[in-house]
Structures are given as C-alpha cells and as structure tokens.
Image: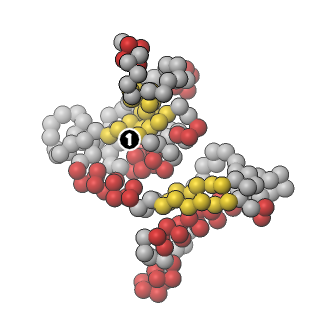
Amino acid sequence: MCEKILSLNKKTIVSLGMYDFKKNGAPFEKRENIHYLYCVAKYPTSLEDIDMPDFSETFFSGFSDHTIGISACLFALARGAKIIEKHFTLNKNYSGPDHAFAINPNELKTMINILDFCSYFWVRVYYEDTDAGGVVYYANYLKFVERARTEFLREIGIPHEDIKKKWSVEFVVRSSLIDYIKPAFLDDLLEVRTCC
C-alpha cells in the first residue's frame, strides 16, 4: 500500500513512531517526495523519552510531537526540523485520548510568535578560534553563541546596555549544556540560530 502511494510521486509525510530506524535505516529507497518525521509513539510522550536527532544529519525532515506543550517542537526546530506535526484541539477538556496533549489555539499562536523571534547570526571561524589542528576549540562555541544572543537582543530592540541602564539587569550564565555533534574548522561559516 505504501509503495503504491509513493509511486504517485506526490509529497508524502511518513511518521516513524513504531519503526526501529536506528536498526533498519529509512524504510523506503530515497525519493524526493518522501518526508520522514521522527516520532515517539507514546500518548502523551514525556520529554525524557525523546532522543531528538540532528535533522541535518539524518533522513528525517521533521518531528511528529505527542508531548504536552510546545517545548519539544521548539527543540526540534532548533535542531533543524523543517516540518512539525502536532495534534490540535480547540479545548483540552474535550473527551477523547488526544485532546489533553494536543496544542490549542493559544499555544499555536505562542509557537508562531516565538518562531518569528528567531535570529540567524553568521560566524566565520578564524585562526584564533581553532586549536593546532584547525578545529574550533570546544569552549569557543560558547563565544559564538554569546555573540549571536547579543545580536538577537539588539535586533528585537533591547540591546545589553539598555537592559543594564533601564532595568539594572545583567545576564549571568548559571549553567550550560552543549551537545557537540560535529566539529567546525578554520574558515567555516557557521549559522547560529537564536530564539526566545
């Protein structure tokens, strides 16, 4: 049945919630019309159950989300997802198994507003950013992120100096969690995405 649908050459979205992609890879040969969604088939899904892929490094195009809220969707988008599938409801109190974890109109609006507040900052890797092998020194990624965050705040009209003068507030890093996916090298041009 799936092969017949794919043979129509129409764009087809395939969610792989019950499929062992780590063991078997993509279920169909590569075609331009297939878009695979990463999915955890639990209703609702807890955040701890998600092993979110780096979408630029896998065959997945997006995320089929069954968590409560929008944080998992935003995380997927930050990791390069191009498609988000989310159950939708007008009222979380409706009867039925999906309404409790479905997104409602206010959450959808919030998610869209957050995405509108995403900024893209480009960083060129200079010699000073690398180690002797031409690979970006691990701690320098934090500098790239800090530059991107600073420019993001400037873009939305609240530069650091204004925050300090108007509200007597300064940013302090309490903790940092970095997941190193692959190295960057001398002369690479890196895209740093910042959202609030």
The residue identified by callout 1 is 84
The spot of residue 15 in percent (x, y) is: 40, 28
Q: Quadrant of the N terminus?
A: top left
Q: How is the image coloured?
A: secondary structure
Tell which residue pokes out farthest to the bottom in this image. Answer: 165
Instruction: Give whichever of 181, 96 is nearer the camera.
Output: 181
Quadrant location of residue 64?
top left
Amino acid, disc 1 = Ile
Residue at the image point whose x is 47% and y is 87% from the top: 165
Residue lying furthest left: 94
Judge from the rendering whether residue 144 lies leftward or rightward of residue 154; answer left or right: right
Residue 34: % across, % down: 44, 27
The local secondary structure at tag 1 comes to: strand
Considering only vertical position in the picture, is 177 above or below 172? above
Q: Residue at x 54, y 70 (%)?
A: 150
Q: Residue 38: image x %, image y %?
A: 45, 34
Number of numbered discs: 1
Q: Is residue 49 visible?
A: no
Query: In the image, is 131 to the left or to the right of 26?
Result: right
Q: Which corner quadrant holds the C terminus?
A: bottom left
Residue 19 lies, in percent from the top left, at: 45, 23
